[in-house]
Image (cartoon, helix red, strand yellow):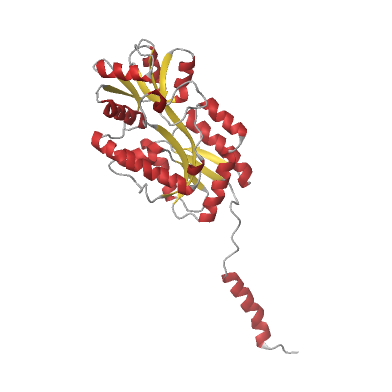
């Protein structure tokens, strides 16, 4: 029996049309996610990101890998993420130095820091402490301020890096108390610690990290934490508000970002995974051991993180420009 041509063509048209339609999108995530850490491996930042990644994996159901890509004040790694597909598979660890200081202190960047990234959530931060050698004749912050003002020609303040939050802390405390002294930049915390213990420098505004154990061992003195609340790792150290320099809040916050244009539902899923990690009691205990401070609830959303970055831009950029601060 001769079959009508229309019955022969119909299945063929169905196949052709079906082939032209896009395949059903796979649920996110369907393969491993990467977090680019734009700094060398090792140190507290690296440990923090790896701990977050481990717990994000449990929520996302896929491996979350970390990849260190240092160079050019963190801009090499950031540029890679800025160029990545906005599909939620390439994340960036971007802190306040990379997102606030670097744009203000570098003449050109391979990306627009205000437009190239979308926020996910804030991570634990590094509060700063004001520390001196034991031979500085001050027992509290008010006495330290008096010593800094009266002996400013003898004060040597160490900072880790140039164009960093530690250097900015030194400049701003000088502005606050109306005195000037010499800032001595170091390429890392280890040589700064060595020189402080040797008496080559006598004052630092530095992240808790490696310095807090020296305080607890009685090798250096701590006068205040530059935050609005005391830190769990050292509850005996008063805040600047309590000690006599109210509102002098300086530190380094950490956060996760994705390329701009990443779908909002993917950002939301990543945010849920990050917050699950931050809520883990074992993770929180580890943060205390590392001397890190948990972010407030309002900064754990994409909107809260964006607002924090904008507020820091407004606060620090005029100070950076007035000081002529430049990145290394």
Residue 159 shown left or right of residue 153 in the figure? right
Residue at x 28% of width, y 25% of height? 177
Q: In which quarter of the image is residue 130?
A: top left
> How many numbered dots are placed on residues in this image?
0
Whether residue 78 is visible: yes
Whether residue 74 is visible: no
Q: Residue furthest right?
A: 1
Residue at x 35% of width, y 49% of height? 112
Nearest the camera: 311 or 42?
Answer: 311
- x then y, percent, for residue 100: 36, 40
- x then y, percent, for residue 230: 47, 27
**Relative to 88, does residue 180 appear above or below in the rendering?**
above
Residue at x 58% of width, y 33% of height? 283
Nearest the camera: 105 or 157?
Answer: 157
Residue 106 shown left or right of residue 241 in the figure? left
**Relative to 286, does residue 93 appear above or below in the rendering?**
below
**Relative to 256, does residue 171 appear above or below in the rendering?**
above
In the picture, the quarter occupied by the N terminus is bottom right
Q: Quadrant of residue 77?
A: top left
- x then y, percent, for residue 314: 33, 43
In the picture, the quarter occupied by the C terminus is top left
Residue 44 shown left or right of residue 311 in the figure? right
Nearest the camera: 36 or 132?
Answer: 132
Q: Quadrant of residue 11?
A: bottom right
- x then y, percent, for residue 117: 42, 49
């Amino acid at each position: 029996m001769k079959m009508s041509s229309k019955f022969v063509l119909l299945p063929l048209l169905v196949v052709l049309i079906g082939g032209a339609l896009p395949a059903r999108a796979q649920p996110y995530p369907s393969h491993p996610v990467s977090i680019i850490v734009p700094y060398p491996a090792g140190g507290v930042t690296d440990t923090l990101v790896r701990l977050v990644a481990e717990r994000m994996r449990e929520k996302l159901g896929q491996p979350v890998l970390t990849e260190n890509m240092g160079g050019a004040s963190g801009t090499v790694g950031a540029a890679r993420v800025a160029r990545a597909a906005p599909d939620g598979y390439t994340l960036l660890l971007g802190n306040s130095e990379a997102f606030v200081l670097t744009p203000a202190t570098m003449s050109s960047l391979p990306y627009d820091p205000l437009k190239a990234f979308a926020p996910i959530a804030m991570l634990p931060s590094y509060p700063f402490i004001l520390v001196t050698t034991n031979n500085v004749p001050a027992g509290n912050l008010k006495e330290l301020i008096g010593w800094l003002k009266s002996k400013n020609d003898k004060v040597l303040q160490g900072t880790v890096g140039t164009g960093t939050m530690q250097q900015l802390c030194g400049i701003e405390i000088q502005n606050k108390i109306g005195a000037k002294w010499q800032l001595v930049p170091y390429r890392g915390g280890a040589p700064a610690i060595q020189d402080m213990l040797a008496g080559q420098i006598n004052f630092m505004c530095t992240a808790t990290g490696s310095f807090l154990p020296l305080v607890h061992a009685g090798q250096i003195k701590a006068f205040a934490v530059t935050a609005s609340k005391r830190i769990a790792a050292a509850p005996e150290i008063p805040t600047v508000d309590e000690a006599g320099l109210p509102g002098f809040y300086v530190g380094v916050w950490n956060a996760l970002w994705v390329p701009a244009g990443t779908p909002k539902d993917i950002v939301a899923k990543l945010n849920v995974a990050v917050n699950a990690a931050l809520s883990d009691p074992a993770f929180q205990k580890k943060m205390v051991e590392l001397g890190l401070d948990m972010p407030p609830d309002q900064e754990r959303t994409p909107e809260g993180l964006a607002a924090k970055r904008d507020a820091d831009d407004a606060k620090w950029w005029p100070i950076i420009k007035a000081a002529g601060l430049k990145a290394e």
